[in-house]
Image: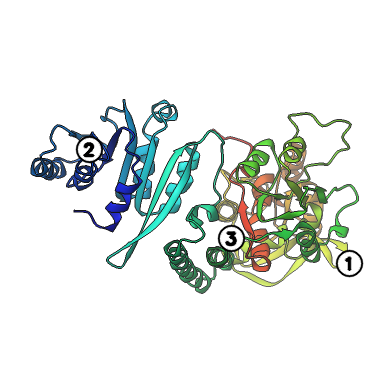
Amino acid sequence: MLDNRLQKIAELVSGRGIAVDVGTDHAYLAAELVTSGKCSRVIASDVREGPLESAARTVEKYGIGENVSLILSDGLADVPMEGVTDVVIAGMGGETIADIIGGLSVESYEQSEIRWVLQPMTKPEYLRRMIYEYEMQITEEYVVEDSGKMYVIMVAEYNPDFRYLTEFDALYGFFSEDDELGWKYRRSEAERLEKIAASLKNAGRDDDAVHYSALAYKLKNGCDYVEIADIYNYLDSKYPFAAQEKWDNSGLLIENHSGAADTVLLSLDISNTVASEAACKWADLVISHHPVIFEPRRRIGVEDPVMNLIYNDIAAICMHTNLDIASGGTNGVILKKLCEKFAVSGEPEPFEELGNGNNLGWVVEFEESITRRELALGLKEIFGCEYVRFNSGSGGLMVKRAAFCSGSGGSMLALADEKECDALITGDVKHDVWISAENGGKKRNVCIFDCGHFHTENIVLWELRRVLEEKYPQLDIEIAERSSDPCQYV
């Protein structure tokens, strides 16, 4: 009666009580569960009348009308859950399955210990992530091959031990290590990602291409640990820690017990929410731009992110001013993005020269003068910010020569004027600086573009991921979802 896919699903149903088959179609699964004696009662639901009519014919054929209830329902909305021990949702997209589970109130399945048997036709990685966001866990996962196609089948149950999946976790799945079909599926997924990486590289999106190549590598080989000292030394070779400002506190600020990491989280800041995300994703190391320890501490309270990291045995490497001034660091990323967005003539010039080949920010000249509004809209796209503040000024409305500095560079207005710039691009500009810009400089009226401290620096995380994944494709490296602008705008 059943193909390999439905037969495996039937095997995974516990039979402890009532089973629900969501999107039953012809009710073949319901018939198998009842006629085999595994379930005494099955609820078969569908959102459309047509499939339910087909299901009714199957129920009549096998004479199981007393054991199978047919219900017209959008997902589980109209399904009575009392006594239900198993819910099967098969043959739908992963996003649809996740929506059906999410539409059921938490109280409906937390206490009843429902066993979810799920078979997504698309986006199993999305479904895996959502299962864990619903405070559940995947206890079993299999691949079934039928007519040359591979189907993923998962079993999920409520789990009070909260965890998030990284992007790689969600792609890798939870197959047994000796499951040959599971490895075949992973190799197939790796080949798919390698094709995506090649397309991205051809499109000039090197950062994303490296990321997909690293994901493909891990799907074939799994993750592996790297000594944190090796990661630190490699970062030091790219963004020398010795070059940091004297007042700064960049470096390996918190160690973990193992001294190694296989999961790394990248973030602009290490807030408590980022530290908690790292713990929920089982990260061993967080790499941030702003130091998690800056001012000397006389005590560490329970609300301190440092306590959160230490409690969860998570190390922290922080790269602040050394990342800002390195050629491929924060300002180097902004330079690249500006040159991609606008036509720039000649070679960029250092904005503030610091010696030893280091400088803070750059000065660029556009091939054609652009309006202040055009530049503001372009910057908004580059930095992904809610808004860009800029002053009207008393000078011209066109920008030909622009200086930029990540973070809080308002104090560099006079330097921008000295270098005969029409614009200064930065963040965190104070009121007195705006007034100074309005009053005009010695040489010209410099227009300030304030794109926000967060947005002018968070942009470097994708470059850090690329740099690390090129060197260590075996590491699971994730940009923190909670590395976000702390401000809201209305």
SS category of the residue bearing label 1: loop
Are the two marked residues, 2 and 3, in contact with CB atoms closer than 8 angstroms?
no
- For the point 73% across and 29% down, which residue is it? 303
**Marks 3/1: CA–CA distance:** 34 Å
Q: Image check: 467 left or right of 415?
A: left
Q: Which mark is residue 370?
A: 3
Position of 285 compared to 374: left or right? right
The reply to whether residue 351 is visible in this rendering is: yes
Q: Amino acid at mark 3?
A: Ile
Which-is-in-front pick, marks 3 and 1? 1
Q: CA distance from mark 2 to mark 3?
A: 61 Å
Q: Residue 229: percent from the left, percent from the top? A: 80, 59
Image coordinates for residue 166, horizontal then vertical, percent: 56, 50
Callout in the foreground (2, 3) = 2
Q: Label 2 amino acid?
A: Ser
Q: CA distance from mark 2 to mark 1?
A: 71 Å
Label 3 element class: strand
Q: Nearer the viewer, mark 2 or mark 1?
A: 2
Q: Is residue 443 visible?
A: no
Verify CB contact (< 8 Å) between mark 2 and mark 1: no
Q: Which residue is mark 1?
A: 356
- The quadrant holding residue 76 is top left
- The residue identified by callout 2 is 45
Which amino acid, mark 1? Asn
In this view, the residue farthest toward the front is 37
**Callout 3 crowding tier (Cα within 10 Å): few <14, some 14–19, many ≥20:** some
Horizontal side, residue 364 vs residue 25: left or right: right
**Quick one: which residue is furthest to the right in this view?**
246
* Vertical position of residue 138 compared to residue 214: above or below: above
